Image (tube, grey):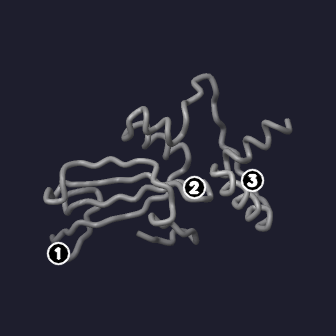
């Protein structure tokens, strides 16, 4: 599925599958399936689909429901929260590494020129890490 949300492209074909969870099977009206993805830019999103009695249901008429699907952008904190709840410990570790129980992460929001952001994306992708991880690595080496 490919969707543009707030001017950003979310594509399940090009993003990295971090893990998934589901309930029941497609013949069950309450069926749902969710997969956590990470874009090459480091952003996370959830792709979910489900039956007519799931959270992904869509109206198709008056009192008529059908199954549906949706893409939901997630903050890194929400992605980790979802992974903690829906993935096994091994899957979580493969996706995010072992949590540092003594550290406390703090969100940092910075405006940078578009040219610099493009270079950051390219460098992070070349190193197969998120932009956040790439910046933290640079700061760790220089501070």
Identify whether 28 is placed above or below 93.
below
- Name the spot of residue 32 as percent of width and height, x first: 26, 54
Quadrant housing residue 39: bottom right
Q: Earlier in the sequence, mark 3 or mark 2?
A: 2
Relative placement, left or right, of 94 versus 115 is left
Relative placement, left or right, of 109 versus 40 is right
Looking at the rendered structure, the secondary structure element under dot 3 is: loop
Real-space Cα separation, disc 1 to disc 2, in angstroms: 37 Å
Say which residue appears at 74% left-offset and 62% top-offset.
117
Looking at the rendered structure, the secondary structure element under dot 2 is: loop
Work out which residue is located at the far right of the displayed protein and give it: 142
Real-space Cα separation, disc 3 to disc 1, in angstroms: 46 Å
Real-space Cα separation, disc 3 to disc 2, in angstroms: 15 Å
For marks 3 and 1, give the one nearer the viewer: 3
- Name the spot of residue 132 as percent of width and height, x first: 67, 47
Identify the residue under disc 2: 43
Identify the residue under disc 1: 62
Query: Number of labelled discs?
Result: 3
Identify the residue under disc 3: 110
Q: Earlier in the sequence, mark 3 or mark 1?
A: 1
Q: Nearer the viewer, residue 110 or 45?
A: 45
Say which residue appears at 14% left-offset and 56% top-offset.
28
For marks 3 and 2, give the one nearer the viewer: 2
- Name the spot of residue 126 as percent of width and height, x first: 69, 56
Relative placement, left or right, of 117 versus 105 is right
- Name the spot of residue 24 as percent of width and height, x first: 19, 49
Identify whether 115 is placed above or below 78.
below
Picture quarter with the N terminus: bottom left
Q: Marks 3 and 2: CB-CB under 8 Å?
A: no
Mark 2: few/some/many CA within 10 Å (<14, 14-19, 20+): some
Say which residue appears at 64% left-offset and 35% top-offset.
105
Looking at the rendered structure, the secondary structure element under dot 1 is: loop
């Amino acid at each position: 599925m490919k969707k543009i949300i707030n001017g950003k492209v979310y594509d399940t074909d090009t993003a990295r599958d971090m893990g998934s969870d589901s309930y029941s099977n497609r013949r069950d009206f309450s069926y749902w399936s969710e997969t956590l993805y990470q874009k090459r830019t480091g952003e996370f999103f959830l792709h979910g689909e489900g039956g007519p009695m799931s959270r992904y249901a869509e109206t198709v008429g008056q009192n008529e429901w059908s199954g549906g699907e949706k893409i939901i952008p997630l903050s890194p904190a929400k992605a980790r929260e979802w992974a903690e709840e829906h993935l096994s410990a091994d899957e979580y570790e493969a996706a995010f590494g072992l949590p540092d129980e003594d550290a406390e992460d703090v969100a940092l929001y910075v405006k940078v020129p578009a040219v610099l952001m493009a270079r950051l994306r390219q460098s992070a992708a070349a190193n197969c890490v998120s932009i956040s991880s790439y910046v933290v690595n640079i700061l760790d080496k220089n501070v």
